Image (cartoon, rainbow, N blue to C red):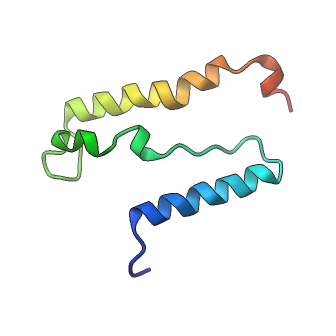
Amino acid sequence: MVGFSLQAMREEVAGAVSTIQAHGDTNINYIDGLKLFGSDYAHLLPDELHPDAEGYRLMGHNFLNEVAAPLFTKSPAMSKH
């Protein structure tokens, strides 16, 4: 789609996830990719597209904090269906 920005796409996906959650799906989540690797880390993109080794290390660290860690800290009552 012409003129469809990455920001607009993020908003659409986040809205779709919210709608699905509102209809009772507790097994779908959304994480904004900027929480994993945002513009503050542009200096770690040597070709302005792909992260270098430090960028991948940072992205993995942020993934653990933003995505993986919360999965392991949920109480058993939260994970029952």
On the image, the x and y values in percent for residue 51 come to 23, 42
- Position of 59 with respect to 42 (left or right) is right
Residue ID at (29%, 34%): 56
Q: Quadrant of the C terminus?
A: top right
Residue ID at (23%, 47%): 50
Residue ID at (53%, 60%): 11
On the image, the x and y values in percent for residue 52 come to 19, 37
On the image, the x and y values in percent for residue 42 come to 21, 44
- Position of 60 with respect to 65 (left or right) is left
In the depicted structure, whether residue 72 falls above or below residue 21:
above
Image quadrant where residue 55 sits = top left
Residue ID at (63%, 59%): 15
- Position of 19 with respect to 56 (left or right) is right
- Position of 71 with respect to 34 (left or right) is right
In the depicted structure, whether residue 79 falls above or below residue 29:
above
Image quadrant where residue 14 sits = bottom right
Q: Could you tell me how many numbered marks the image carries?
A: 0
On the image, the x and y values in percent for residue 36 come to 40, 37
Nearest the eye: 36 or 60: 36
The furthest residue to the left = 46
Q: Quadrant of the N terminus?
A: bottom left
In the depicted structure, whether residue 22 falls above or below residue 29:
below
The furthest residue to the right = 81
